[in-house]
Each structure stands twice: as C-alpha cells, then as structure tokens.
Image (tube, coloured by chain):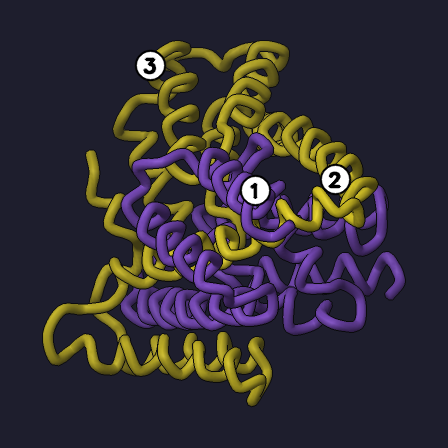
Chain colours: A purple, B yellow
Amino acid sequence: MDQIALFLEFLRASALSVGGLASLPLLRSTLVPAYATDAQIVQSLAIGRLSPGPNGLYLVSLGYLVAGWPGAISALLAACLAPLVVLPATTLGRRWLLSGWFAGTVRGVALASAGLLAGTGIIIMIVSGTAPWQLILAAAATILTIRGTLHPAVLVGIGAAAGLVFAR
Amino acid sequence: MTDSPRARDLLRAWIDIGSQSVGGGTSTLFMIRRVLVDQRRWITPREFTEAYALSQLSPGIHFVAMAGLLGRRLGGTRGVVIAVAGMMVPASLITAIMTAFFAAVAEHPIALAALAGIAPIAAGMTLGQAVILGRPVIHRGPRGILDLAVAIAAALVVLTAGGSTIAVVLASGLVGALFLRGARPTSQETEMS
C-alpha cells in the first residue's frame, strides 16, 4: 500500500467515525490481514493506552507498524485533519448543526460506531486466545473500562504480568 | 479574556496538555480544563463546556476538534495550528518511539507471553469503549429498540464479516437522520456545566 493510499485509509476511517477509538473497526476491515496482523492491532491499542495524548493515538502506533515513520506521519495528519471540519461547520452552519436531522445522523453514526467497536472487541478476543484466564482478564478489563476507576496503563500492566505468568 | 496569549505560551500550554494526559479520555479532558481554565484562565468554564459539546459532533478524535475550537478562540488560525500540533505532535512522537521499541522485541518469547495477556485487556477496553459510546445514545424504554437494533446490526456485520463497515456507518447515519431525530446527539458529559 503506498503512502497516499494509506493516508486516505486513515482519513476515511477518522472521518466516518465518532470518537477516538471508533475508527478501529473501519481500519481493521481494510488493513487486516493484507497489511497488518491482529497482533499488531493489539500492540497499537496497548501502546496507545500507555503513551500520552488522546485515545485515538493508537492510529499513530498502527501507522508505524504498517509503514514505519512515514506511516506514523500519515496517521497523525489524518487524525488531525478529520475532526477539524468542526471549525468551518461552526462558523458556516451553526443552525445546520443544531437541526434535528443532523442530530439524528450523528446519533446513528454513534450507534453504528458502538456496535462496530463491540464486534471488533469480540473478534480481537477470539483471534488472540480464549483460555479461561484470558476470558477473565477481558471481562475485568471491560468492566473496569466502563467504570473508569483504574488507569488504563495499569490495566495493560496487569495484562502483561498475567501473560508472563500464564502464557509461558 | 481580553487579549490573546503569546504564541510561545500557547504552544507550551498545549504541549503540557498532550504530553501529560496519559491514557486519553477523561485524563485529556481534565488536563485541558486544568491548564486552560484553572491555571492560565484563558478560557471560561462556559467556553470550555461549549467547546466540549461542539467537539462531540465532530468525526474522529473529539479532543482534536476541541483543541481546534479552543485554539481558534485563543489565537485564530495560528491558534488552531499551535493547539492541534502542540497537543498531538509530541504525544505522537512518544507513541511512535514506544511502538518502534516494542516492535523490535515483539518476537521475543517474553514479549509474546506479555502480549497474550495484553490482548484480552485490549479486547476488554474496546468492548468497554463500545458501551461508553453506546450508553448515552441508546434511549431507555420502547424508543431504545431501534437504537439497539442499529448497534446490534453493526456488531453482527463485523462478527460475520458479512458486509462493508463503511456501508454500515453510512446506512446508520441515514437511519439516524430519518428516524432518530429530535434527541440530543451528544454524550452524557455534555450536560455538565
């Protein structure tokens, strides 16, 4: 995949999703298995949670894994450009942004993003191992993420420690 | 709130926000508020809340939209570039370096064992994010049936690999425009003031 195609892929995934992680299902459907593996998706998600900055920076990690530094730069540019359509939208179409059908569209896309993310989470689970200890970890991570009481970096650390104990 | 802060001060503030908000989500929101509203007093709580609400309507990473809106408020177009670059570039650099380091050791047995434990965590965090994203937009009661149907249909398309994810997003947007109007589109946190 050349640089421009990769950039457009990241841009499309960012432009058609609502929220940082919501671009994941769209990217996974075009990049796996031709250009990336599910193991690399997991790595990028974990590093995105360990590194500073917004959630959606897993994109930069994934870009790096797919195409090195140029891939990381493509991903960063796409991640910065897509959300900024809000700037012209708020000056040119404030009334339009407050319309019922626009609210409905955002709602519909948010619902799709949630469903796609749930499906993608289950697939990551299935392809990366369903031993009992892994299922328990996944359930705990789901609940703790929803409750938001434990720092995500701590969760990743617990996962790595559990892996070193159970997977060797 | 009278005159614009200097470019150098703006850049330093946004680099602080980007590089000190580990883990994303509420930690990023907290940093934006602390740096711009509480410490520098460049942004009023009301402006902060408005920018947050508008950013929830944007595609992609909402905090980039929020940085863009607050950056424009603080320094016009130059403010937008400073805010987005300051928040994203140093954080991305750290992310890419961490990725490069990990990719170099990824095939080592110890790294593979750690990844076997990190994978279910990543899966669980993704599922949790799906709930966080879906919960505020799914109505309680009978109205929620259509909401749930859209989300479940999208999940099934992924699970069965039975269609294009882009088509799902576009179709759901259309269903939303036609049938889900009249309700606030944004997340529960929008209500804060």
Q: Position of residue B10 (x, y in %)?
A: 56, 16
Q: CA distance from mark 1 to mark 2?
A: 13 Å
Label 1's element?
Answer: helix
Labels in figure, total: 3
Q: Nearer the viewer, mark 2 or mark 3?
A: 2
Label 3's element?
Answer: helix
Going by the numbered disc 3, the residue's amino acid type is Asp
Circle 2 packing at 10 Å, graded few (<14), some (14-19), many (20+), is some
User: Which residue position holds label 3?
Assistant: B38
Going by the numbered disc 1, the residue's amino acid type is Ala
Label 2's element?
Answer: helix
Residue B193 picture quarter: top left
Residue drawn 79% across and 41% down? B105
Circle 3 packing at 10 Å, graded few (<14), some (14-19), many (20+), is some
- Chain name for mark 2: B
Residue drawn 41% across and 19% down? B36
- Chain name for mark 1: A
Residue A14 picture quarter: bottom right
Visible in this render: residue A162?
A: yes
Left or right: B79, with B150 as reference point: right
Quick one: label 2 or label 3, which is nearer the N terminus? 3
User: Which residue position holds label 2?
Assistant: B102
